[in-house]
Amino acid sequence: MPTPAPVLVLLGGAGDLAMRMLLPSLYHLELDNLLPPALRIIAVGRAPGDADSYRAEVKADLEARDMFDAAGWARISARLDYCATDAGRPEGARVLADRIGDHGDLVFFYALSPSLFAPVTQALQAAGLTGERTRLVLEKPIGRDLESSRAINAAIAAAVPESRVFRIDHYLGKETVQNLIALRFANTLFEPLWTSRSIDHVQITVAETHGVGDRWPYYDDYGAIRDMLQNHMLQLLCLVAMEPPSDLEPDAVRNEKVKVLRSLRPFTRASAASDSVRGQYGDGVVEGQAVKSYESEVGRPSATETFVALTAWIDNWRWAGVPFFLRTGKRMAERNTQIVIQFKPVPHSIFGGAAVDDLVANRLVIELQPDEDIALTIMNKRPGLTQEAMRLQPLPLSLSLARALGGEGGRRRIAYERLLLDALRGDQTLFVRNDEVEAAWRFVDGVADAWAAAGMAPRPYPAGSWGPGGAFALIERSGRSWNE
Ligand code: BG6
């Protein structure tokens, strides 16, 4: 008897995430012949429709992108089916079970609101769809706080063991984020310096130029700390700060990340004002275009932050006394995601005269977006035969990944391509474990509670700026400054 084919089910298959990210990712994997040959893909949505109308919609969307390939489309469209049903209800899940029929590995991708995670899982279980070959891939956010994330994790655990649950943080699928692991653990150069002995502070910036637009009904309930800090920012912080794992096995890496999260110093009412800044964008100009305020997008007054900057402290041996300055915001001056490792100055300068002022400490800048670049500033002698004392200047030792890899780096991939492939293969290394999610929520809940206790409302900032002035004061108070 032939082995039944693996099936990937996209719950929320007609939604924004599926259309914008998942289908283009699957299509690219198809073009590169990376999908399991017999894989069937079933998109599930509540909207009426059939496979033909769904395929036409996906095709139109892909054609609007730059790399449409008729042969590739023919291959993926042959795999693609659409099932109009409500998978959150037992009878709806039974309809889906009939459509799935015999299956090999069965992967459900929840591109759904987190409020549906528990009912959908229960309905899938009741329909007999959570057997040993089933994996669940859950899109962030897992809940809105610690309590709701625990309820979701418990509902999932009642149906499927943790070894078959794949929680997505798409930042972990980004090539440069994985490169951070290579940079730290495949080079002898950095790791001996990667401690409070040599590092003065760390900055993590995720600046976006777009606003919240149509997503405001979701965003207004979450804000920047729940939408970005709880997941992407803290994951980046974990990869910078974690101890070397023994290998790249999923739990080896995740054990180290969770230790970092548990070492984060909780915010208090007293530290809220000195260690954090909340902001919300007003009208302004971004990339030459006049744009409206957050409240105009929402259509009413709102107390949700679209910007957060904070100082995080990791209370462990490696990082004692090293501030991690984190900031993220929408409608910022430019799109930029970067991690800055600021080393300490030399302990004693042998250079006199003007060179004393020239001397700046080494800085490692890992840029993730818009370009992928790693640059280490090192001090050099300024060339010349001057009679005066030696003059110095910092110059970047720069590794532009696009330039260095040339064609070999290939097309820049959508982060979901890697993650979909790993979920289909069953590799959990780049997925977030239940205890990690809960530890991250514990920290973020602490920030939200501290803000509430201190009565901290978001400060306005003009769209197209770098956030409220307080974000500069936050870092400058300690004699440091953001890397611009
Ligand atoms: C998502 C957030 O998880 O990440 C969005 O919900 C944000 O608000 C997006 O814009 C940023 O992702 P990227 O890959 O564009 O940096």
Image: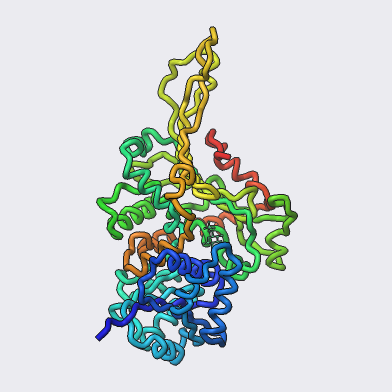
Q: From where the camera sits, is residue 231 visible?
A: no
Horizontally, is 353 left or right of 36 in the view?
right
Please, which residue is most extreme toward the front here? 71
Q: Which residue corresponds to the image point at 55% horizontal and 45% vertical from the top-left?
A: 274
Horizontally, is 291 left or right of 429 in the view?
right
Scheme by which the image is coloured: rainbow
Q: Which residue corresponds to the image point at 44% horizontal and 81% vertical from the top-left?
A: 120
Q: Which residue corresponds to the image point at 32% horizontal and 71% vertical from the top-left?
A: 164
Please, which residue is most extreme toward the right here? 290
> As displayed, is residue 46 above or below residue 160?
below
Q: Image quadrant of residue 417? A: bottom left
Ligand 1: image quarter: bottom right
What is the quadrant of the C terminus in the image? top right
> As displayed, is residue 161 above or below residue 4?
above
Q: Which residue corresponds to the image point at 46% horizontal and 74% vertical from the top-left?
A: 76
Q: Residue 372, position in %: x, y?
A: 49, 47
> As displayed, is residue 83 above or below residue 8?
below
Q: From where the camera sits, is residue 321 visible?
A: yes
Please, which residue is most extreme toward the top here? 387
> As displayed, is residue 33 above or below residue 305?
below
What is the quadrant of the N terminus in the image? bottom left
Q: Residue 387, position in %: x, y?
A: 54, 7
Horizontally, is 285 left or right of 316 in the view?
right
Residue placed most toward the observer, 238 or 288: 288
Q: Residue 232, position in %: x, y?
A: 47, 57
Q: How many marks?
A: 0
Q: Residue 481, position in %: x, y?
A: 56, 37
